[in-house]
Amino acid sequence: MGCCGSAERTKREWRPLEDRSCTDLPWFLLFTVFCVGMGSICSFTIVTGGAARLVFGYDSYGNTCGTRNERIEGVQLSGLDHTDRKFVFFLDPCNVDIVQRKIRSTALCVSLCPTEELKNYQDLKRFAMLNGSELCSYDMAGHKYPSLPERVSKCPKLPVPPSKPLLVFNRCTPVDISCYAKFAEAVVTFVGDSSVLHRLIAGVAASKEIIIGLCVLALVLSMVLMVIIRYISAVLVWILTSLVVLGSLAGTSALWWLYIDHRLYGDSTGTKEDQDQDQDPETSRDQGQALLVYAGAATGFTIILLLLMLFMRKRVALTIALFHVAGKVFTHLPLLTLQPFVTFLALLLFWIYWILVLLFLGTSGNPVQNEETGLTEFRLTGPLQYLTWYHAVGLVWITEFILACQQMTVAGAVVTYYFTRDKNRLPVTPILSSILRLVRYHLGTVAKGAFIITLVKIPRLFLMYIHNQLKGKENACARCLLKTCICCLWCLEKCLNYLNQNAYAATAINSTSFCTSARDAFVILVENALRVATINAVGDFVLFLGKILIVTTTAFAGVLLLNYQRDYAEWLLPLIIVCLFSFLVAHCFLSIFEIVVDVLFLCFAIDTKYNDGTPGKEFFMDKALMEFVESSRRLERAVERGRNRVKEAVSEGAEMKPMAPGTSSA
């Protein structure tokens, strides 16, 4: 038996695009059952009234606004008929709990939100009489507001700011921007000066058209860069190589110069204050030893780097060829540029659904009276409280599933491109064909790969949560242990992500199960370890430079445009928003380019391993990769001829060597 029950084969026979069969069907069924469970949680919140409480709102006594309510045992003022009271009104809407991220105020159901400022209790009385909307507690008559002694605790804080209801969630929200600063302070706790926040918000509001235009510019630059990067990849790679080598040599030289200077002149190069003080000989000796260690380490690093550059220069040429072919892939498969949009849209819809259900869960369960405030809240108790944990696992697993679907879709399209000899006979829409193959055959494989990432990510997130909760309380040893575990899990997650991506490509080629594909891809990667290291190191840095190019270009255009618009003072926040968005867009698009390069390399490694260009074993690769293979073969033949000449010279020298005296026969 092979990995996870897969049948063990004595020798892998790669048959690109020949057979198709369903893979990892049990995992597809398990994932389907899990998704049904996620949907059941949403149904539970709707049936138990949690969704209605979130949408329509509820008061501090457990009554849902806009409906007739049943009485809650032990809670006064519950069970009221709020059919005509459809809006939630907070007595002190600006009283925000920074820690708990919620409003610490009594909530009432009212029939109308106050649209103008109410300065005293006479205004409250007049508003109640004219509009029939009583803004004080239910047990107080509107015409008695000014005379009742409990009006201070049961009526809203004066003055009552004008407010308006939200479009979907029927909450009366203040129109005054100062309350927005309070809400923003609840989210961003480091904001201390509300005037600064007001200016930042005003800057964003005034420059919204420029922000949108710059975001579109970043999007266009990312799409253009993916097409033209094949023409500039060679220049970028060799510039990068030269800068790394020169930087290493310069740093090593500087360290040796500092060491020699220290040995010759001691502390004479220090500042005047240091010269006035007596120099400790022990300290001077330690400084010299430290400089010697640094210079020696830098020298060793530089020598190793130069040797790596010398022996891996051919593999750098392979990276350039792969970038060139990847650019051609985007030319033949333009729909690949839409993959980030599709994935982002799918993630956005799922995250919106997940957040809504999470909010529904926050208003579901049994009514419980808060001992501190005396207000009624709804909480999940008993086994139902584990629904939140189930929902949290669903966030990670389904998110990873969507990202894995993108990887499988891109891999399927690239595999189809690579293993089609005549590019004119490509399918009309390889991307759609890849999606159909994914949905029909390989959803189980994607679900299994996503679950493996989930098993590593959830413990890491849990340890990060514990680390944040214990910040400042744990000792140094526990803090170091937690950070070590988090770092190890992060490294493991990155390695598994890379292996999963190649496993999806192997599945797209051979239609094998996840474990079999992961094993086959791992064997191919190990056999080409130096090539993999070169592509990941050089290729990733080139793509990083591409991201920096897009961000800096967008930021430069933003500075010019925002500086031209001088009708507002603060444009730092709009510029930060534009830079963050441009980096996100560049990362999404160039990540697709990175996936294409990795899949092309796996296809290239398989092609060169099982084909040699002879009749019946013709290569599938592109012309640029073919040129790389031919140049590598010419170099290997030249090296082999040199070795043969050396062997012949050695053998001839041994034959011509004179015989020693006394060895001749009588």
Image (tube, rainbow, N blue to C red):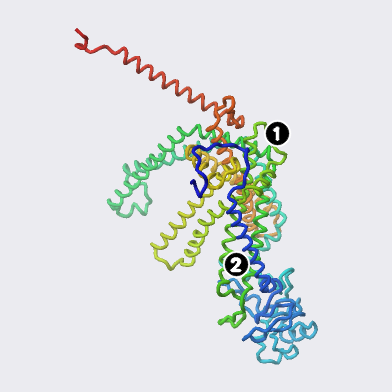
Disc 1 versus disc 2: nearer the observer:
1
What residue lies at 57% left-to-right and 75% top-to-bottom?
381
Q: Is residue 30 above or below residue 222?
A: below
Left or right: residue 72 versus residue 67 is left
Q: Which residue is mark 2?
A: 187
Q: Position of residue 419 (x, y in %)?
A: 62, 35
| Residue type highlighted by circle 2 | Val
Of the residues under marks 1 and 2, which one precedes in the sequence? 2
Q: Is residue 532 visible?
A: no
- At x 61%, y 35%, the residue is 324
In screen coordinates, is 94 left or right of 310? right
Count of labels shown?
Answer: 2
Residue 135 picture location, percent across and down: 72, 82
Q: Quickly name the residue at label 1.
A: 425
Distance of label 1 from label 2 (alpha carbons): 55 Å
Observer-nearest residue: 566 or 386? 386
Asked where in the image residue 162 lies, by quadrant, the reply is bottom right
The quarter of the image holding the C terminus is top left
Residue 319 image position (x, y, % from top left) = 55, 36
Classify mark 1: residues with Cα within 10 Å, few (<14), some (14-19) or many (20+).
few
Residue type highlighted by circle 1:
Arg
Residue 285's tag is: none
Nearer-the-camera pick, 230 or 567: 230
Name the quadrant containing residue 658. top left
Q: Position of residue 28 (x, y in %)?
A: 60, 54
